[in-house]
Amino acid sequence: MLFRKITIGLNLLLAICRSASFIIYIITRYVLRYRHEILMQNFANAFPQKTAEERKALVKAYYKHLGDLVVEPVLFALASPAARMKLATYSNKELLSDLYAKNKHAIVLASHHGNWEYLINLPREVDFQVYTAYTPISNLRIDSWVHKMRSQMGVTVILKKNFYKAALSALRAPDSPALVVVIADQRPAPGSSKYSIEFLNQNTSVQLGAERLALASNAVVLYLQCRKVARFHYNYTFHLITENPASSKPLDITRQYYKMIEKDIDLDPATWLWSHKRWKPVDPLSGRTQ
């Protein structure tokens, strides 16, 4: 009976979210034309082999996915614990179980492909204490709600400005295996990075905070693949990048990470976060982002 109630509740939530997502899709695509030029430019640069019509189809698919992304945090917050485990499923958790049994710390490199907000449920799936960075939201009510949601799920949230020091301390603790989740595919702050790699057919400035953290702690580094398996439903799969970061050459971890993201984007291009300004001009003299 309990399962039946959970199923009915989830179905009702999904119906409401489908309607809300459609409204958001109409508004962002046709009324606001939200970052339409950025989308067209990003798709043109990343997929020069695609025709104009194919890129327009990607823009349409992206706006639909964006509508889902907006409502999914609310859906996840209102869903029951059992329903959340239907919305977010995990594969290859045995890898983490093995690391935990060996008392090894791990850094999980996630991305803006698929859905990253559902990761707040990760403490219910693994034995590790889970840590992640948090950037305060300007709206205090929303900020309080988001922070409360993440904390209630068991995630230890750390202010972004304090994240590196606190995460490194957790990864060096001798008797409490830590799992530090880092979403590392954002654009570096202007002037902060002189490193770039080839990503999606473009010279791309990258931030190296996650790699620095891995080298300083020698924690195992994993990549978290995210696939949208159905509307509002995602599957997350853990992949090993390296068990011994200290033996890696400079930028090796970052390059592997971006190659994995690129492979996932090739499989499902519309579900990466294309509407942000990921690419900025690079100063030809200093090599730094402008």
Image (tube, rainbow, N blue to C red):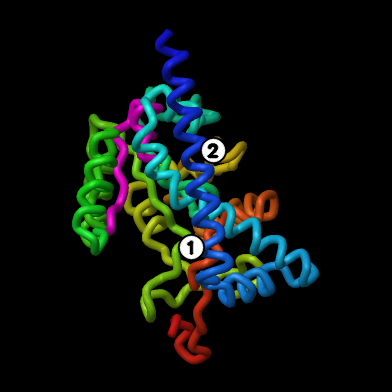
Q: Which residues are magenta?
A: 119-135
Q: Between disc 2 and disc 1, whose residue precedes? A: 2
Q: Which residue is mark 1?
A: 250
Verify whether residue 127 appears in magenta: yes
Residue furthest top in the image:
1
Labels in figure, total: 2
**Which quarter of the figure has residue 197?**
bottom right
Q: Which residue is mark 2?
A: 234
Q: Looking at the image, do the residues carrying marks 2 and 1 touch, with CB atoms under 8 Å apart?
A: no
Image position, residue 118 (x, y; %) = 42, 40
Q: Secondary structure at mark 1?
A: loop
Image position, residue 227 (x, y; %) = 59, 42
Image position, residue 28 (x, y; %) = 52, 64
Q: Amino acid at mark 2?
A: Tyr
Q: Residue at x 28, y 38 (%)?
A: 155
Relative to the observer, which residue lies in front, 23 or 252? 23
Using a 10 Å C-alpha cutoff, classify the residue at mark 2 as few (fewer than 14 neighbours), some (14 to 19) or many (20 or more).
some
Relative to the observer, which residue lies in front, 47 or 248? 47
Verify whether residue 235 appears in magenta: no
Give me the C-alpha separation between circle 2 and circle 1.
33 Å
For residue 191, say whether it is visible: yes
User: Image check: 208 left or right of 57?
Assistant: left
Q: Is 225 situated above or below 258?
A: above
Image position, residue 290 (x, y; %) = 43, 85
Q: Nearer the viewer, mark 2 or mark 1?
A: 2
Relative to the observer, which residue lies in front, 248 or 17? 17
Q: Residue at x 43, y 8 (%)?
A: 1
Using a 10 Å C-alpha cutoff, classify the residue at mark 1 as few (fewer than 14 neighbours), some (14 to 19) or many (20 or more).
some
Q: Residue at x 47, y 30 (%)?
A: 12
Q: Amino acid at mark 1?
A: Pro
